[in-house]
Amino acid sequence: MKPSFVLDCSVILSWCFRDEQNNYAMSVLDRLESETAIAPWFCPIEFCNVLLGAERKGRVTHDEVSNIIDYVARMGILLDKGIFLWNSVNLLQIARKFALTSYDAVYLELATRLRLPLATLDDKMLSAAKAGGVGIYSPQ
């Protein structure tokens, strides 16, 4: 399965919290029925960390977290293992150039390396993608 776009964790999380859902994120979700997304290898860790924080704050229950993880796991999102942080000069250059965290820079590096558009709800990543010549995924 060849991926059509790089999927940022911000979009995935928006599917999971009703108060964060928006038309863009829900359209991306709909496109997963006919297209394949790819995310960095650590995306499930990032995702689980946010869910754990939401659980600790009482925003979701333990059972809801388990259901959310099962739901997202069934989507068939591919995970890229192509960047290794021990040799990541390019990653650091991207992070520095666009004032991104190293985590966010990985999404931009992945989109650049695979020549795929990026699906994100993060304004800083949107600006960096545009400035870096990375397309923004349009789920229409």
Image (cartoon, grey):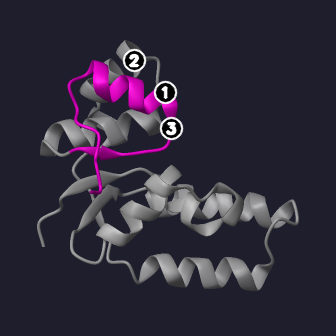
In this rendering, which labeled residue sits more in front, label 3 or label 2?
3
Q: Which mark is residue 98?
A: 2
Q: Which mark is residue 124?
A: 1
Q: Do the residues bearing badges 2 and 1 touch, measured as CB atoms within 8 Å?
A: yes
Left or right side of 38 for 116: left
Q: Are marks 1 and 3 in contact (CB under 8 Å)?
A: yes
Decide: few, some or many residues near mark 3? Use Cα within 10 Å; few <14, some 14-19, many ≥20.
some
First reached walking from the N terminus: tag 2 or tag 1: 2
For residue 122: magenta? yes
Residue pointed to by mark 3: 122
Q: CA distance from mark 1 to mark 3?
A: 6 Å
Q: Which residues are magenta?
A: 117-140
- Residue 12 in percent (x, y) is at 49, 61
Of the residues shown, which amino acid type is indicated by label 1? Answer: Lys
Task: Say which residue appears at 29% left-offset and 56% top-offset.
Answer: 139
Can I make out residue 85 in this image?
Answer: no
Measured from the top left, where is residue 2 in percent x and y?
Answer: 11, 66
The residue lying at 27 percent from left, 34 percent from top is: 87
Q: Nearer the viewer, residue 71 or 103?
A: 71
The answer to whether residue 119 is visible is: yes
Marked residue nearer the N-terminal end (3 or 2) = 2
Residue 8: give x, y in percent of width and height: 42, 50
